[in-house]
Amino acid sequence: MNWTVIIMFLAFVGATLVITYFASKRTNSASDFYTAGGGLTGWQNGLAISGDYLSAASFLGIAGAIALWGFDGFFYSVGYLTAYLVVLYVVAEPLRNLGKYTVADMIAARFELKKVRAFAALSSITIVIFYMLAQLVGAGALIQLLFGIPYSVSVIIVGIMMTIYVLFGGMTATSWVQMIKAVLLMIGTILISILVLIQFNFNIFTMFGEMKNVTAPELEGSFLNPGAQGQSPLNNISLIVALLFGTAGLPHILMRFFTVKDAKTARSSVMWATWIIGIFYILTIFLGFGAAALLTREEIIAANPAGNMAAPLLAERLGGDLLMSFVAAVAFATILAVVAGLVLSGASAFAHDIYGQVIKKGQVTESQQMLAAKIAAFSVSALSIILAIFAQDQNVAFLVSLAFCVAASANLPVIVYTIFWKRFNTQGAITGILTGLAVSLILVILGPNVMNAAGTGFIAMDPIFPLSNPALISVPAGFIGAFLGTFLGKPESYDKYREVKVKSVTGISTAEVNH
């Protein structure tokens, strides 16, 4: 057991627990718990968004995917980064102006029927659990590598810690943990990138020249070209569709726009986040291809079959135990920060939307809502831990891409139509959410990652649906479902649309204007 690693881990865990302790003293209301009272500045929220978005999939999964599959792994970096343009230009300001705590709040600003809110909350909880799986798989692999603790025990330890952060600190603690983690992650990534470049005399062409030494027979001649994984072009296009449109439907990312005071600050947050995230994803080139050049494929796969430990192994090769300990602590911080945000968004979807608005019809006290949120946080954590124990051999970047697929299929069509389509109605909203959710989940189950005759999936038989990520089918299905549901349902008054249109742009309701 490595004492450098232990000290780094304990130092970070201690620091985050101190943050949680002080944050708990400032968490006295539902607004404090869900949105930190809306008091974050643009740069603070931008850092926190970066900390929320740069997950284990980014740091561990993408580095591993590039190290094992070359250009095919870099698809994830391209998709995750460009997705923020959709958030910036389509979603950020209207969401902040229309919502209060959750995505369902924003949709309910136009459709007051409780069913719409319930289905939107159900979609959010499904996305959260998919995303949580990826983080816990990454955490389990990391702690197993460093401490020799069994994978299942590692997952349980992380699950307990993240639940503590959320139960006691709420969004305030989560935000500060995410900000600190974003800074540490950028420091670690820049440091490793510089050390990789030193190995090649700061010549990126020399580094790529080393890629010819990747000796796996199945990669011969294709490591720097699309198709190294043997995936069809349609499969890669489907993946990009999920990544490009999924961010604008992720509940834990969208929830961050409610932690600022107004739409202008929300836009500023996205600008800060885009720069930080953009720099990070450019640097994944050095993490992934550096690992491919300086480590053997066998080393990477031996540590974790999906390649999730490539970045920590690269750090150990370049900087010994000290750098590996720092990188491992940063990766652990990454997972805890993201998972805390996910638990919080899942808990808010249940406590605020399902319990507070649907079951109690808005007649709920602050203390009742916070108790429901804490029970929901515990439940979401427990379910995710159980599922993560069975998903050990899945690449975390891939698992996150499934969450993006569900978000783009179920949430995004309804968000876009709510803001921009005058004819859109309650039936269209319900149909869109259910169609996107059902099609994406069914096709994932029928696809090659769940059904696999080689035994690497959950069901040992040939897949019925050929694409690993079904976004190419499920995203259009969500938009078409919402479109058809609108025309099959009863026409509704356009008064609500006019109010939403004014408020989404200005933040001022028509009632305030008339007054």
Image: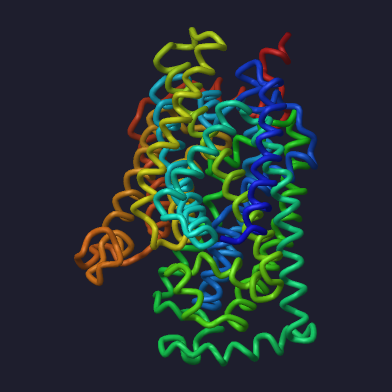
Tell me if residue 98 can be seen: no
Look at 35% across and 65% down and name the residue there: 467
Q: Residue 139: where, in percent of width, then height?
A: 51, 53
Q: Is residue 357 left or right of residue 257?
A: left
Extreme-left residue of the structure: 461
Tell me if residue 50 can be seen: yes
Look at 33% across and 53% down and name the residue there: 390
Q: Nearer the viewer, residue 183 or 332?
A: 332
Q: State whether residue 158 is above or below residue 221.
A: above
Look at 45% across and 74% down and name the residue there: 301
Quarter in which the C terminus is drawn:
top right
Q: State whether residue 141 is above or below residue 373.
A: below
Q: State whether residue 260 is above or below residue 272.
A: above
Q: Residue 370: where, in percent of width, then height?
A: 54, 18
Q: Residue 255: where, in percent of width, then height?
A: 60, 35
Q: How many marks?
A: 0
Look at 75% across and 75% down and name the residue there: 195
How is the model colour-coded? rainbow
Question: Hey, which quadrant is residue 199 in on the image?
Answer: bottom right
Q: Nearer the viewer, residue 315 or 377?
A: 315
Q: Is residue 137 left or right of residue 434?
A: right
Q: Residue 438: where, in percent of width, then height?
A: 32, 44
Q: Nearer the viewer, residue 182 or 105?
A: 182
Quarter in which the N terminus is drawn:
bottom right
